[in-house]
Amino acid sequence: MLEFRELEEPRPFTKAEQQAINDLKSMFKQKTKINFQTDNYFLTKFLRYRDWNVEAAYKSIVTYYELKRDNPLVHADKKVSEYIDLLNLNTRVLLDKRDKNGRIVLVAKLGNVGPTTEFNDASLLDDIWMQVLLSDPMTQMNGISFITDCTGLNSSILKWLVPKNCKVGAAKLESLPIKDWTIHVVNMGPIFKACIFLIKPFLRKATIARFQFHSNGYADLIDNLGEDCLPDEYGGKNGAIDYEKSLKFILSREKILARNREFGFKNAKPRKYKDTSKTTRLQMQIEMENCNGNINTITADIARENELNLKLGRKWGEKAEKELAECDENRAIKLRLLEERVVQDKNIPNARRDDAFLLRFLRAKKFDVDKSFRMIQKYFKMKSESPDLFRISPLSDMQNLLKMQMQQILPQHDENGSVIYLFRVQNCDPYKWPAEMVFRSNIMALEYAIRDPRTQIGGLVVMLDMAGLKFAHAKFLSPNLAKRSAEVIQDSFPMRFKAFHILHEPFYFDAMLALIKPFMSEKIRNRLHTHGNDLKSLHRHIPKEILPTEYGGTQGAFDNTKWRDQLLNDQEYFTHLETYSCDPKQLKTTISESTTNGVNGIGTEILNEH
């Protein structure tokens, strides 16, 4: 392995250097809350970092301890051997020769980061390596060359890049007492470009300038580091990377880590720290949202929806890619961008932020992050402003209404992948059922349907049978209900409404439609189809093979019993769904229609500048 003189100076300190060390030690006596490490090797790495400026070095050490106190789970606090499973992933490897400038070379193999590896895991590894490498005076003086190899990088890494993690990661990077360092990025693809786009706002310009992106193979890398230190795979002359030798090296440096663990804030209590490990990440989100419902219920439903997304199959994947521009990379990138927008919006602090929920809105808006974000804002604003229309639970209130056989989502998809929502006016007694309750039952049907990823992709077709319409039904078309219905269809609910088919409409239907049209966009108006009593006209749009016999179909008589029972058995889900909301008094009256530069293009100009 390379020559490594941890804790051993290559030459005696000068009088000025020794005086700086002594002055720095004396400053520690004034800070009783911190148990400072006073070993020369520890102090000199900060003094060299700050050009032997004692006051600047002191501030850097305090910042280092504060970061360690406030973020304990991203700093190693155990024996190095206890991290053996992480180390065996070979995501970090030390080359056995320094580069041509005398720098030590540490390689990050991002392709070895597994889908289950978390942000904290990667941060712990970096902390272990930095503690060890910076104990070497030659490294303190000459610096470090980092090689970030993006070969095989998995899109799951994007889940790390929530604002909290970006801030912590940037703070750790910029607090490292390394005077001279560079990150050389090789084999970069679109996923890492997305990572840079998300991290960049949290980095200083001086830090960004230390990144070098090598897009022309390894020629520039060899020019910067020299071929003698580089392994064969990077065009060098140093043979194959020896992962075993690197592992033995780090395991043999336990005494350095043990010494460092003894110091820091006394009785340290983390400030505003949130654990983002895999086992608690979802729970953390729910706690942040101040939800008091059944966490297990919503967690299980998210897991179920995520599993359904994974099992969509080729047919649905191709449809999503063709119609929605959805693919693995695009999905992962846009989810993180949308999550960041939701997290930063103080007006909707109680919004769901899990991937399953956010994906519904991205699909509804064809992966346009700005439009998806505005729809989320409107979704929660609508629910909060009109709880009488959007409160679903308790489902026992709906039981008798659903038994009237007035509505159902039919069990089969049409040839375009859409589900059919059939509503029958003649079974809706206007004297018995308040208009608000009928509206709520429709919202419940939509909330139930949207949990299926196939419906998110294929959309929904509304089939309205107006047979039996009475003048008493006019209360269902009040301006408020008409406006809210239009909002659900057009702006506020993450459903792709593909068409509206009207059957058995009365002669005065045009007059009724005139009440609704002012609230409808031209796109929705163009999707309205009236068929009167002509079932053949209906069958040109919806195949009779998926329709009940009452509509010329082959699926037997209309019966919503099975569908109704499925809804009523999900009481806990619908109850918990209502714990997510916003305060309409705090939500902005006008939701901005402006777009954020770079978001929908995934920061194309920024990412391509390298």
Image (cartoon, helix red, strand yellow):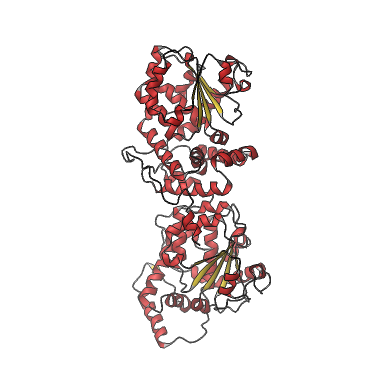
Q: Nearer the viewer, residue 409 or 505?
A: 505
Above or below — where is 14 with respect to 167? below
- Which residue is at 53% across, 81% downward? 8
Above or below — where is 316 with respect to 390? below
Above or below — where is 367 with respect to 210? above
Instruction: Say which quarter of the image contains residue 413.
Output: top right
Q: Position of residue 178 (x, y in %)?
A: 47, 72
Q: Nearer the viewer, residue 522 or 135?
A: 522
Count of numbered tags: 0
- Which residue is at 39% across, 25% downward? 517
Q: Is residue 551 visible?
A: yes
- Quadrant in the picture for the N terminus: bottom right
Above or below — where is 569 with respect to 232? above
Q: Position of residue 545 (x, y in %)?
A: 63, 21
Q: Position of residue 159 (x, y in %)?
A: 52, 51
Q: Residue furthest right?
A: 239
Q: Nearer the viewer, residue 56 or 490?
A: 490
Q: Is residue 558 visible?
A: no
Q: Position of residue 510 (x, y in %)?
A: 41, 18
